[in-house]
Image (cartoon, rainbow, N blue to C red):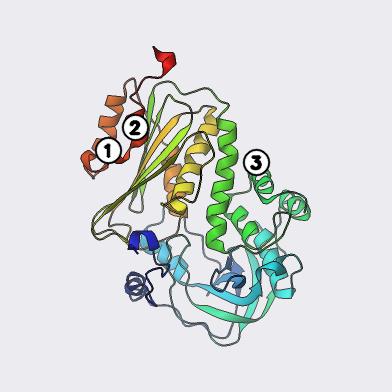
Amino acid sequence: MSCITCKGRGECGQPVCPIVRRLEELVSLPKIGSRMEGFTPPEVFVGRFGYPLVRAGPVLPSARAEELPHLGMNMDEIISARMGMVRSETKVRVMEADEPGRLLEACQQIAMSSAPVGAEVSFIKPPRRRLQFDGVLSPTGPSGELAKMEITTNPLIPRKVDQIVLDRGAPADVAIAELYSAGIDIDHLSRLLSIGLLGNKRRLVPTRWSITASDDMIGKSLKDAVLDFPEVKGYHLFSGEELGNHFEVLLFPRPFSFELIEIWRPHSLWAEEGFIGRDGEDARPKKGYSPLAGGYYAARLAVLEHLSRWGRQAGVLAIREISEDYRIPLGVWVVREVARKAMSSDPTRFDALSSAREVMAGRLHTPEVSWIKKAELLTGSTQKRLNEF
Protein backbone atom coordinates (compact mmCIF):
# COMPACT_ATOMS: atom_id res chain seq x y z
CA MET A 1 0.00 0.00 0.00
CA SER A 2 1.44 3.37 -1.05
CA CYS A 3 1.81 6.10 1.58
CA ILE A 4 0.12 8.59 -0.75
CA THR A 5 -2.95 6.34 -0.81
CA CYS A 6 -2.97 5.45 2.88
CA LYS A 7 -1.97 8.83 4.39
CA GLY A 8 -1.49 7.51 7.89
CA ARG A 9 -4.61 5.35 8.11
CA GLY A 10 -2.65 2.15 8.81
CA GLU A 11 -3.61 0.33 5.62
CA CYS A 12 -0.02 -0.93 5.23
CA GLY A 13 -0.54 -3.20 8.22
CA GLN A 14 2.08 -1.58 10.44
CA PRO A 15 0.84 -0.88 13.99
CA VAL A 16 2.02 2.75 13.79
CA CYS A 17 2.58 4.79 10.64
CA PRO A 18 6.34 5.58 10.53
CA ILE A 19 5.67 8.99 8.98
CA VAL A 20 3.13 9.90 11.66
CA ARG A 21 5.47 8.61 14.39
CA ARG A 22 8.23 10.87 13.07
CA LEU A 23 5.87 13.85 13.13
CA GLU A 24 4.73 13.09 16.67
CA GLU A 25 8.32 13.20 17.87
CA LEU A 26 8.64 16.80 16.64
CA VAL A 27 6.23 18.28 19.18
CA SER A 28 5.87 18.31 22.95
CA LEU A 29 2.39 18.28 24.45
CA PRO A 30 1.00 19.80 27.62
CA LYS A 31 0.35 17.55 30.59
CA ILE A 32 -3.38 17.26 31.29
CA GLY A 33 -4.94 16.27 34.58
CA SER A 34 -8.03 14.09 35.05
CA ARG A 35 -10.33 17.14 35.09
CA MET A 36 -10.55 20.21 32.87
CA GLU A 37 -12.90 22.95 31.79
CA GLY A 38 -12.94 25.34 28.87
CA PHE A 39 -14.78 26.40 25.74
CA THR A 40 -15.03 23.84 22.97
CA PRO A 41 -14.43 25.75 19.66
CA PRO A 42 -17.21 24.17 19.11
CA GLU A 43 -15.85 20.84 17.91
CA VAL A 44 -16.86 17.22 18.37
CA PHE A 45 -15.11 14.07 17.23
CA VAL A 46 -16.53 10.70 16.17
CA GLY A 47 -14.03 7.92 15.51
CA ARG A 48 -14.30 5.09 13.01
CA PHE A 49 -12.44 2.20 14.66
CA GLY A 50 -14.75 -0.50 16.02
CA TYR A 51 -17.70 0.74 13.96
CA PRO A 52 -20.62 0.54 14.79
CA LEU A 53 -19.27 0.89 18.37
CA VAL A 54 -17.21 4.09 18.11
CA ARG A 55 -15.58 6.68 20.35
CA ALA A 56 -17.14 10.13 20.41
CA GLY A 57 -16.88 13.32 22.43
CA PRO A 58 -16.11 17.04 22.41
CA VAL A 59 -12.71 18.60 21.75
CA LEU A 60 -11.61 21.16 24.34
CA PRO A 61 -8.55 23.39 24.63
CA SER A 62 -6.19 22.77 27.54
CA ALA A 63 -6.43 26.48 28.44
CA ARG A 64 -8.99 28.95 27.10
CA ALA A 65 -10.68 28.65 23.72
CA GLU A 66 -8.20 28.83 20.86
CA GLU A 67 -8.89 30.40 17.50
CA LEU A 68 -9.67 27.74 14.95
CA PRO A 69 -6.95 27.24 12.32
CA HIS A 70 -7.41 29.38 9.23
CA LEU A 71 -5.56 30.69 6.22
CA GLY A 72 -3.30 33.49 7.32
CA MET A 73 -1.75 31.42 10.10
CA ASN A 74 1.57 29.76 9.35
CA MET A 75 2.05 26.04 9.92
CA ASP A 76 3.74 26.47 13.30
CA GLU A 77 0.88 28.66 14.55
CA ILE A 78 -1.68 26.10 13.45
CA ILE A 79 0.16 23.24 15.15
CA SER A 80 0.54 25.34 18.29
CA ALA A 81 -3.21 26.01 18.31
CA ARG A 82 -4.04 22.35 17.75
CA MET A 83 -1.54 20.67 20.08
CA GLY A 84 -3.46 21.89 23.11
CA MET A 85 -6.78 20.54 21.84
CA VAL A 86 -7.82 17.62 24.06
CA ARG A 87 -10.08 14.97 22.57
CA SER A 88 -12.50 13.49 25.08
CA GLU A 89 -14.03 10.14 24.18
CA THR A 90 -16.70 7.74 25.31
CA LYS A 91 -17.84 4.55 23.60
CA VAL A 92 -21.22 4.79 21.92
CA ARG A 93 -23.10 2.82 19.29
CA VAL A 94 -23.87 4.78 16.14
CA MET A 95 -27.60 3.91 16.39
CA GLU A 96 -27.84 5.71 19.75
CA ALA A 97 -27.97 9.06 17.94
CA ASP A 98 -31.75 8.64 17.65
CA GLU A 99 -32.22 8.24 21.42
CA PRO A 100 -29.07 9.71 22.96
CA GLY A 101 -27.95 9.28 26.53
CA ARG A 102 -26.84 12.22 28.62
CA LEU A 103 -23.26 12.41 27.32
CA LEU A 104 -24.22 12.09 23.67
CA GLU A 105 -27.04 14.61 24.05
CA ALA A 106 -24.53 17.13 25.45
CA CYS A 107 -22.26 16.48 22.45
CA GLN A 108 -25.20 17.13 20.13
CA GLN A 109 -25.91 20.45 21.84
CA ILE A 110 -22.27 21.46 21.30
CA ALA A 111 -22.44 20.43 17.64
CA MET A 112 -25.54 22.56 17.05
CA SER A 113 -23.92 25.70 18.42
CA SER A 114 -22.39 28.33 16.15
CA ALA A 115 -20.23 29.74 18.97
CA PRO A 116 -17.90 28.23 21.61
CA VAL A 117 -19.67 26.31 24.37
CA GLY A 118 -18.40 26.09 27.93
CA ALA A 119 -17.90 22.55 29.19
CA GLU A 120 -16.45 20.81 32.21
CA VAL A 121 -15.16 17.26 31.81
CA SER A 122 -13.53 14.64 33.97
CA PHE A 123 -11.56 11.68 32.66
CA ILE A 124 -11.26 8.16 33.96
CA LYS A 125 -7.51 8.77 33.93
CA PRO A 126 -5.32 11.60 32.61
CA PRO A 127 -5.35 11.84 28.78
CA ARG A 128 -2.54 10.29 26.76
CA ARG A 129 0.02 12.87 25.63
CA ARG A 130 0.02 12.27 21.91
CA LEU A 131 -0.47 14.53 18.89
CA GLN A 132 -2.64 12.74 16.35
CA PHE A 133 -2.21 13.39 12.63
CA ASP A 134 -4.37 12.40 9.70
CA GLY A 135 -4.74 13.20 6.02
CA VAL A 136 -8.36 14.35 6.42
CA LEU A 137 -8.79 15.51 10.03
CA SER A 138 -7.18 18.48 11.76
CA PRO A 139 -4.48 17.44 14.26
CA THR A 140 -5.55 16.91 17.86
CA GLY A 141 -3.51 16.60 21.02
CA PRO A 142 -4.03 14.40 24.09
CA SER A 143 -7.06 12.11 24.27
CA GLY A 144 -8.79 10.58 27.25
CA GLU A 145 -11.87 8.54 28.14
CA LEU A 146 -14.73 10.59 29.53
CA ALA A 147 -16.10 9.88 32.98
CA LYS A 148 -18.45 12.87 33.19
CA MET A 149 -19.30 16.02 31.23
CA GLU A 150 -21.37 19.11 31.97
CA ILE A 151 -22.20 22.01 29.66
CA THR A 152 -21.65 25.23 31.59
CA THR A 153 -22.93 27.84 29.11
CA ASN A 154 -25.91 27.99 26.78
CA PRO A 155 -25.16 26.88 23.20
CA LEU A 156 -25.88 29.52 20.54
CA ILE A 157 -28.02 27.55 18.09
CA PRO A 158 -29.11 29.22 14.82
CA ARG A 159 -32.87 29.06 14.33
CA LYS A 160 -32.51 27.31 10.97
CA VAL A 161 -30.31 24.61 12.52
CA ASP A 162 -32.89 24.03 15.24
CA GLN A 163 -35.66 23.74 12.64
CA ILE A 164 -33.81 21.27 10.43
CA VAL A 165 -32.67 19.10 13.35
CA LEU A 166 -36.28 18.79 14.49
CA ASP A 167 -37.38 17.83 10.95
CA ARG A 168 -36.93 14.07 10.85
CA GLY A 169 -38.59 13.74 7.46
CA ALA A 170 -35.83 15.43 5.44
CA PRO A 171 -33.05 13.24 3.98
CA ALA A 172 -29.53 14.24 5.02
CA ASP A 173 -28.56 15.63 1.59
CA VAL A 174 -31.70 17.79 1.43
CA ALA A 175 -31.15 19.03 4.99
CA ILE A 176 -27.52 19.92 4.31
CA ALA A 177 -28.37 21.75 1.08
CA GLU A 178 -31.05 23.78 2.85
CA LEU A 179 -28.76 24.68 5.75
CA TYR A 180 -25.95 25.64 3.36
CA SER A 181 -28.34 27.90 1.42
CA ALA A 182 -29.23 29.54 4.74
CA GLY A 183 -25.57 30.44 5.33
CA ILE A 184 -24.52 27.66 7.72
CA ASP A 185 -20.81 27.02 7.15
CA ILE A 186 -19.36 23.71 6.01
CA ASP A 187 -17.67 22.85 9.34
CA HIS A 188 -20.96 23.31 11.18
CA LEU A 189 -22.74 21.08 8.66
CA SER A 190 -20.12 18.38 9.06
CA ARG A 191 -20.53 18.45 12.85
CA LEU A 192 -24.31 18.07 12.60
CA LEU A 193 -23.97 15.12 10.24
CA SER A 194 -21.24 13.47 12.29
CA ILE A 195 -23.05 13.62 15.63
CA GLY A 196 -26.24 12.14 14.16
CA LEU A 197 -28.56 15.14 13.89
CA LEU A 198 -29.52 14.97 10.20
CA GLY A 199 -31.42 12.55 8.00
CA ASN A 200 -34.39 10.19 8.22
CA LYS A 201 -32.47 7.57 10.18
CA ARG A 202 -30.24 9.27 12.72
CA ARG A 203 -26.80 7.68 13.02
CA LEU A 204 -23.39 8.83 14.20
CA VAL A 205 -21.01 9.26 11.28
CA PRO A 206 -17.24 9.10 11.79
CA THR A 207 -15.85 12.62 11.49
CA ARG A 208 -13.52 11.79 8.60
CA TRP A 209 -16.51 10.47 6.64
CA SER A 210 -18.79 13.38 7.51
CA ILE A 211 -16.26 15.97 6.27
CA THR A 212 -16.06 14.43 2.80
CA ALA A 213 -19.78 13.62 2.73
CA SER A 214 -20.66 17.26 3.45
CA ASP A 215 -18.34 18.53 0.70
CA ASP A 216 -19.78 15.96 -1.69
CA MET A 217 -23.46 16.61 -0.93
CA ILE A 218 -23.15 20.38 -1.22
CA GLY A 219 -21.09 19.96 -4.38
CA LYS A 220 -23.78 17.78 -5.97
CA SER A 221 -26.46 20.33 -5.10
CA LEU A 222 -24.44 23.20 -6.60
CA LYS A 223 -23.61 21.13 -9.68
CA ASP A 224 -27.31 20.55 -10.40
CA ALA A 225 -27.85 24.32 -10.39
CA VAL A 226 -24.71 25.13 -12.40
CA LEU A 227 -25.73 22.78 -15.22
CA ASP A 228 -28.59 25.16 -16.05
CA PHE A 229 -26.31 28.20 -16.47
CA PRO A 230 -24.81 29.45 -19.77
CA GLU A 231 -21.20 28.59 -20.56
CA VAL A 232 -18.33 30.95 -19.82
CA LYS A 233 -16.77 32.84 -22.69
CA GLY A 234 -13.02 32.69 -23.12
CA TYR A 235 -10.45 31.10 -20.83
CA HIS A 236 -10.12 32.16 -17.19
CA LEU A 237 -7.11 31.16 -15.09
CA PHE A 238 -7.26 31.43 -11.30
CA SER A 239 -4.30 30.97 -8.96
CA GLY A 240 -3.73 30.71 -5.21
CA GLU A 241 -1.16 29.37 -2.78
CA GLU A 242 -0.74 28.89 0.96
CA LEU A 243 0.65 26.34 3.43
CA GLY A 244 2.62 24.51 0.77
CA ASN A 245 -0.46 24.02 -1.44
CA HIS A 246 -0.61 25.72 -4.86
CA PHE A 247 -3.74 25.77 -7.06
CA GLU A 248 -4.10 26.61 -10.73
CA VAL A 249 -7.71 26.46 -11.92
CA LEU A 250 -8.56 26.92 -15.60
CA LEU A 251 -12.15 27.52 -16.72
CA PHE A 252 -12.97 27.19 -20.40
CA PRO A 253 -16.15 27.28 -22.54
CA ARG A 254 -17.71 23.82 -22.33
CA PRO A 255 -20.58 22.17 -20.47
CA PHE A 256 -19.61 21.51 -16.86
CA SER A 257 -16.87 18.97 -16.33
CA PHE A 258 -14.28 18.85 -13.60
CA GLU A 259 -10.81 17.36 -13.46
CA LEU A 260 -8.33 17.51 -10.59
CA ILE A 261 -4.66 16.71 -11.04
CA GLU A 262 -2.86 16.30 -7.74
CA ILE A 263 0.93 16.67 -7.77
CA TRP A 264 2.99 15.77 -4.69
CA ARG A 265 6.46 17.03 -5.41
CA PRO A 266 9.49 14.88 -4.47
CA HIS A 267 10.31 14.95 -0.72
CA SER A 268 6.77 16.08 0.13
CA LEU A 269 4.86 14.66 3.08
CA TRP A 270 3.39 11.40 1.78
CA ALA A 271 5.46 10.96 -1.39
CA GLU A 272 9.24 10.92 -1.05
CA GLU A 273 9.62 10.03 -4.74
CA GLY A 274 6.82 12.31 -5.89
CA PHE A 275 3.32 11.42 -7.11
CA ILE A 276 0.87 12.60 -9.76
CA GLY A 277 -2.76 11.48 -9.58
CA ARG A 278 -5.91 12.37 -11.46
CA ASP A 279 -9.68 12.10 -11.20
CA GLY A 280 -12.61 13.80 -12.89
CA GLU A 281 -16.26 13.83 -13.89
CA ASP A 282 -18.63 15.34 -16.42
CA ALA A 283 -22.26 16.44 -16.16
CA ARG A 284 -23.32 12.92 -15.18
CA PRO A 285 -23.26 11.87 -11.51
CA LYS A 286 -19.81 10.79 -10.37
CA LYS A 287 -19.43 7.08 -9.76
CA GLY A 288 -17.45 5.64 -6.88
CA TYR A 289 -15.14 7.27 -4.35
CA SER A 290 -12.32 9.40 -5.69
CA PRO A 291 -8.80 7.90 -5.58
CA LEU A 292 -7.68 11.39 -4.53
CA ALA A 293 -9.82 11.01 -1.38
CA GLY A 294 -11.40 13.99 0.40
CA GLY A 295 -9.25 16.58 -1.36
CA TYR A 296 -11.13 15.94 -4.63
CA TYR A 297 -14.52 16.87 -3.17
CA ALA A 298 -13.11 19.85 -1.25
CA ALA A 299 -11.52 21.32 -4.40
CA ARG A 300 -14.62 20.63 -6.50
CA LEU A 301 -16.80 22.40 -3.93
CA ALA A 302 -14.66 25.55 -4.06
CA VAL A 303 -14.93 25.70 -7.86
CA LEU A 304 -18.68 25.02 -7.89
CA GLU A 305 -19.24 27.76 -5.30
CA HIS A 306 -17.57 30.22 -7.65
CA LEU A 307 -19.53 29.07 -10.71
CA SER A 308 -22.77 29.22 -8.72
CA ARG A 309 -22.10 32.83 -7.66
CA TRP A 310 -21.08 33.76 -11.19
CA GLY A 311 -24.08 32.09 -12.83
CA ARG A 312 -21.97 30.20 -15.38
CA GLN A 313 -20.90 26.65 -16.17
CA ALA A 314 -17.52 25.66 -17.57
CA GLY A 315 -15.04 22.93 -18.20
CA VAL A 316 -12.66 23.01 -15.24
CA LEU A 317 -9.08 21.83 -14.95
CA ALA A 318 -7.75 22.22 -11.41
CA ILE A 319 -4.14 21.45 -10.56
CA ARG A 320 -3.09 21.12 -6.93
CA GLU A 321 0.68 21.09 -6.44
CA ILE A 322 1.94 20.21 -2.95
CA SER A 323 5.50 21.10 -1.94
CA GLU A 324 7.76 19.95 0.88
CA ASP A 325 6.61 23.06 2.79
CA TYR A 326 3.43 21.13 3.61
CA ARG A 327 5.42 19.13 6.13
CA ILE A 328 2.60 18.22 8.53
CA PRO A 329 -0.94 17.07 7.56
CA LEU A 330 -3.41 19.73 8.68
CA GLY A 331 -6.64 18.27 7.35
CA VAL A 332 -8.70 18.49 4.19
CA TRP A 333 -9.92 21.97 5.17
CA VAL A 334 -6.60 23.26 3.79
CA VAL A 335 -7.46 21.97 0.30
CA ARG A 336 -10.90 23.56 0.41
CA GLU A 337 -9.72 26.93 1.72
CA VAL A 338 -6.70 27.28 -0.58
CA ALA A 339 -8.92 26.37 -3.54
CA ARG A 340 -11.42 28.99 -2.34
CA LYS A 341 -8.59 31.49 -2.10
CA ALA A 342 -7.62 30.73 -5.70
CA MET A 343 -11.21 31.12 -6.91
CA SER A 344 -11.53 34.48 -5.14
CA SER A 345 -8.47 35.85 -6.95
CA ASP A 346 -8.72 38.06 -10.03
CA PRO A 347 -8.44 35.66 -12.96
CA THR A 348 -6.23 36.15 -15.98
CA ARG A 349 -8.37 36.00 -19.12
CA PHE A 350 -7.21 34.53 -22.44
CA ASP A 351 -8.76 34.20 -25.88
CA ALA A 352 -6.81 31.04 -26.73
CA LEU A 353 -6.26 27.82 -24.80
CA SER A 354 -2.60 27.69 -25.82
CA SER A 355 -1.90 31.01 -24.10
CA ALA A 356 -3.71 29.96 -20.92
CA ARG A 357 -1.90 26.65 -20.86
CA GLU A 358 1.49 28.33 -21.26
CA VAL A 359 0.89 30.69 -18.32
CA MET A 360 -0.52 27.91 -16.13
CA ALA A 361 2.46 25.68 -16.80
CA GLY A 362 4.84 28.53 -16.01
CA ARG A 363 3.31 28.99 -12.56
CA LEU A 364 3.92 25.36 -11.57
CA HIS A 365 7.25 23.96 -10.38
CA THR A 366 6.55 20.55 -11.91
CA PRO A 367 7.43 20.44 -15.65
CA GLU A 368 4.41 20.29 -17.93
CA VAL A 369 5.66 17.12 -19.57
CA SER A 370 5.26 15.32 -16.22
CA TRP A 371 1.54 15.99 -15.82
CA ILE A 372 0.10 16.91 -19.22
CA LYS A 373 -0.75 13.31 -20.15
CA LYS A 374 -2.93 13.11 -17.05
CA ALA A 375 -4.95 16.14 -18.19
CA GLU A 376 -7.57 14.28 -20.19
CA LEU A 377 -10.01 17.16 -20.04
CA LEU A 378 -7.46 19.68 -21.25
CA THR A 379 -6.49 17.52 -24.22
CA GLY A 380 -10.13 16.85 -25.09
CA SER A 381 -10.98 20.55 -24.87
CA THR A 382 -8.92 21.26 -27.98
CA GLN A 383 -11.27 19.12 -30.08
CA LYS A 384 -14.11 20.89 -31.89
CA ARG A 385 -17.72 20.02 -31.16
CA LEU A 386 -20.28 19.46 -33.91
CA ASN A 387 -21.92 22.83 -33.33
CA GLU A 388 -18.59 24.59 -33.95
CA PHE A 389 -18.29 23.49 -37.57
Q: Earlier in the sequence, mark 1 or mark 2?
A: 1
Task: Please identify the residue farthest to the top as the structure is shown.
Answer: 389
At label 3, the amino acid type is Ser
User: What x and y, as percent, mark residue 119?
Assistant: 65, 72
* Residue corresponding to mark 1: 372
Residue 121 in percent (x, y) is at: 63, 79
Say which quarter of the image contains residue 37.
Answer: bottom right
Is label 1 in contact with label 3 (beta carbons under 8 Å)?
no
Rendering quarter of residue 18: bottom left
The image shows residue 5, relative to residue 321, as above or below, that is below
Distance from Cα at disc 1 to Cα at disc 3: 37 Å
Q: Quick one: label 1, few (<14), some, or many (20+) residues within 10 Å?
A: few
Disc 2, SS: helix
State the image coordinates of residue 8 (x, y, percent, origin top left): 39, 67
Position of the N terminus by quadrant = bottom left
Element assignment for label 1: helix
Q: Is residue 203 visible?
A: yes
In the picture of the structure, the residue carrying the numbered disc 2 is: 378
For the residues marked 3 and 2, what is the alpha-carbon distance in whole angstroms?
32 Å
Which type of secondary structure does the marked residue at label 3 adopt? helix
In the image, is residue 192 above or below residue 253?
below
Q: Nearer the viewer, mark 1 or mark 3?
A: 1
The reply to whether the C-beta atoms of the residues labelled 1 and 2 are less than 8 Å apart is yes
Spatial separation of the CA atoms under disc 1 and disc 2 = 8 Å
In-front residue for pair 259/326? 259
- Residue shown at 58% from the left, 67% from the top: 46
Callout in the foreground (3, 2): 2
In which quarter of the view is residue 78 placed? bottom left
Which residue has dot 3 on it? 181
User: Closer to the camera, 371 or 312?
Assistant: 371
Label 2: how many residues lie within 10 Å, few (<14), some (14-19) or many (20+)? some
